[in-house]
Image (cartoon, rainbow, N blue to C red):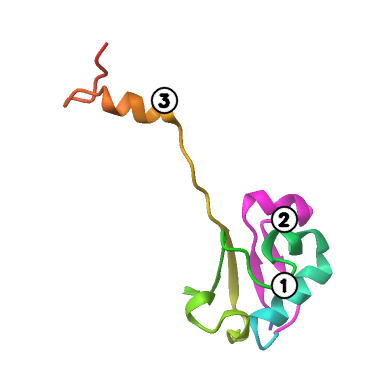
């Protein structure tokens, strides 16, 4: 029995390009699972956690389908054979897209 991490695209450069990492163990908590991941791939740690060992605000971690912020944080229980998904929040946009939308006619065509 082992736990598998799903790694988002922006962090794959720190996991040798792998989109999934099997940590080969069945830790009891999310904190323990992350420690194993960080031992295997040290570069991932600073992108996920702060110096105070807290998960960064723009990082979301799910154990199965449950968000760790609502299930106990790093103390979240990790059942055997779990999948842990790391999701990096993406924000922003383009002002040119917003301007284009404001010039759009009801049929979707842009006004000149």
Residue matched to label 3: 96
Residue 42 on image: x %, y %: 82, 63
| Quarter of the image where the C terminus is located | top left
Query: Dot 2, crowdedness within 10 Å: few (<14), some or many (≥20)?
Result: some
Residue 98 on image: x %, y %: 36, 31
Query: Dot 1, crowdedness within 10 Å: few (<14), some or many (≥20)?
Result: few
| Quarter of the image where the N terminus is located | bottom right
Residue 60 on image: x %, y %: 55, 65
Mark 1–mark 3 Cα distance, whole angstroms, equals 39 Å
| Mark closer to the observer (3, 2) | 3
C-beta proximity under 8 Å, tags 1 and 3: no
Q: Regarding mark 3 in the picture, which secondary structure is present there? A: helix
C-beta proximity under 8 Å, tags 1 and 2: no
| Mark closer to the observer (1, 3) | 1
Residue matched to label 1: 52
Look at the image and give the residue range highlighted in magenta: 3-26
Residue matched to label 2: 18
Mark 1–mark 2 Cα distance, whole angstroms, equals 27 Å
Q: Nearer the viewer, residue 80 or 76?
A: 76
In-image side of 69 versus 74 (left or right): left
Q: Regarding mark 2 in the picture, which secondary structure is present there? A: loop
Residue 92 part of the magenta-drawn span: no
Residue 10 part of the magenta-drawn span: yes
C-beta proximity under 8 Å, tags 3 and 2: no
Asked which quadrant contains residue 77, the reply is bottom right
Q: Earlier in the sequence, mark 1 or mark 3?
A: 1
Considering only vertical position in the picture, is 102 above or below 90?
above
Q: Earlier in the sequence, mark 1 or mark 2?
A: 2
């Amino acid at each position: 029995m082992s736990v598998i991490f799903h790694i988002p695209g922006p962090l794959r450069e720190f996991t040798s390009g792998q989109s999934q990492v099997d940590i080969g163990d069945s830790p009891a908590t999310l904190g323990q699972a992350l420690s194993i991941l960080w031992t295997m791939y040290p570069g991932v740690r600073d992108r996920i956690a702060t110096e105070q060992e807290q998960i960064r605000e723009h990082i979301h971690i799910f154990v199965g389908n449950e968000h760790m912020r609502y299930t106990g944080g790093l103390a979240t229980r990790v059942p055997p054979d779990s999948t842990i998904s790391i999701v990096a929040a993406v924000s922003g946009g383009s002002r040119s897209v917003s301007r284009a939308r404001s010039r759009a006619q009801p049929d979707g065509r842009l006004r000149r």
